[in-house]
């Protein structure tokens, strides 16, 4: 799957990774196009063949120790030769800040940052962050609720009752992630759902209007993001359609090239949709543990026939 490319605000980048700005010139943003990270040891030695200048550059104790073995003139040459390339930024990880690095960053208007973490720890944190911001993303119409720890994506056409079902689930002690629109990112082999920042923790209930779930039900009724485990599609009851009654005709839905278990739940007056979704979540958890009600029934029937 292809990576995205994003322009990241330097302020946001530093706040997320707890970085100190040593130089950024007049820049407010930097262009990130890959989640891979580079350590420019060979480049400081003068070897630039196959240099990945599109990557974030991380300098640690080894690179700084190598520079300190040079004369002042050699350090200036090595640093200026490296900073002549237009990379997104350089981060010094828990190492001495040499004046030649700062001077070269200022001369070529490059972003130079400082981390208090050791090199390995910082690269781990950086890789996680870059995977998040570059992850393939889509926005789907629906709601996302955490039910017993299972991320349930509720879909269906408008006015079928998605928000009302989510509201009843909140009253039962479950947690809202998003209502009406769900931003979904694929990070590694997981689909992470969250609400758009502008509508986070809000719900729209027809006839009532907008409600602030956090203010009305407390912080325990919400969460910012959740791994999506299953999809539940609500649809108007169709008497001519044969719905799955045993659980042996389970459907799937493809989202960002990942296949999720999908339940189709028909809606008609008198059906307790919140209770049905709770059962769907519990059933999914049991299935992941190797417990299947249909298999148990078949085993019982088989044992009685013997």
Image (tube, rainbow, N blue to C red):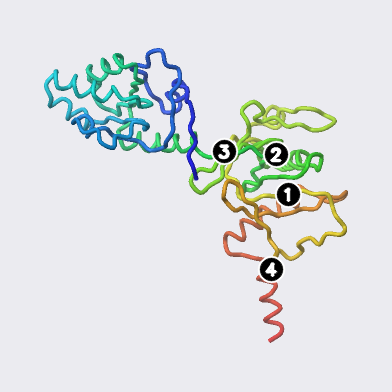
Mark 1 element type: strand
Q: Position of residue 5 (x, y in %)?
A: 48, 32
The mark that comes first in sequence, 4 or 1, is 1
Which residue is the site of mark 2? 141
**Mark 2 in CB contact with mark 3 (< 8 angstroms):** no
The mark that comes first in sequence, 1 or 3, is 3
As displayed, is residue 11 above or below residue 261? above
Mark 2 element type: strand
Label 2, residues with CA under 10 Å away: few <14, some 14-19, many ≥20: some
Give residue 226's quadrant in the image. top right
Q: Position of residue 132 (x, y in %)?
A: 49, 36
Question: In whole angstroms, how far apart are the C-alphas of marks 2 and 3?
Answer: 14 Å
Q: Which mark is residue 137?
A: 3
Mark 3 element type: strand
The mark that comes first in sequence, 4 or 3, is 3
Label 4, residues with CA under 10 Å away: few <14, some 14-19, many ≥20: few
Left or right of residue 28: residue 203: right
């Amino acid at each position: 799957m292809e990576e995205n490319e994003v322009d990241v605000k330097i302020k946001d980048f530093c706040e997320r990774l707890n970085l100190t700005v040593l130089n950024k010139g007049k820049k407010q943003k930097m262009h990130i196009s890959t989640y891979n990270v580079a350590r420019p040891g060979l480049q400081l030695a003068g070897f630039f063949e196959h240099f990945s200048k599109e990557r974030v550059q991380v300098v640690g104790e080894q690179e700084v120790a190598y520079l300190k073995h040079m004369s002042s003139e050699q350090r200036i040459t090595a640093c200026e030769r490296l900073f002549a390339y237009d990379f997104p930024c350089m981060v010094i990880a828990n190492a001495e800040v040499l004046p030649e690095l700062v001077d070269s960053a200022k001369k070529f208007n490059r972003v130079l940052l400082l981390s208090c973490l050791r090199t390995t720890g910082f690269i781990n944190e950086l890789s996680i962050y870059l995977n998040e911001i570059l992850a393939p993303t889509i926005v789907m119409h629906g709601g996302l609720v955490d039910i017993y720890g299972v991320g349930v994506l509720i879909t269906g056409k408008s006015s079928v009752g998605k928000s009302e079902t989510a509201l009843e689930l909140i009253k039962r002690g479950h947690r809202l992630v998003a209502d009406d629109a769900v931003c979904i990112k694929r990070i590694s082999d997981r689909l992470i759902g969250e609400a758009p920042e502008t509508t986070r923790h809000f719900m729209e209930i027809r006839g009532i209007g907008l409600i602030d779930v956090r203010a009305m039900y407390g912080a325990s009724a919400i969460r910012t993001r959740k791994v999506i485990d299953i999809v539940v599609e609500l649809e108007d009851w169709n008497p001519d359609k044969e719905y799955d009654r045993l659980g042996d005709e389970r459907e799937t839905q493809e989202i960002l090239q990942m296949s999720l278990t999908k339940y189709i739940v028909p809606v008609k007056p008198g059906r307790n949709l919140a209770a049905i979704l709770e059962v769907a979540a519990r059933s999914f958890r049991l299935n992941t543990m190797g417990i299947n009600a249909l298999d148990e029934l078949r085993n019982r029937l088989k044992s009685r026939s013997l």
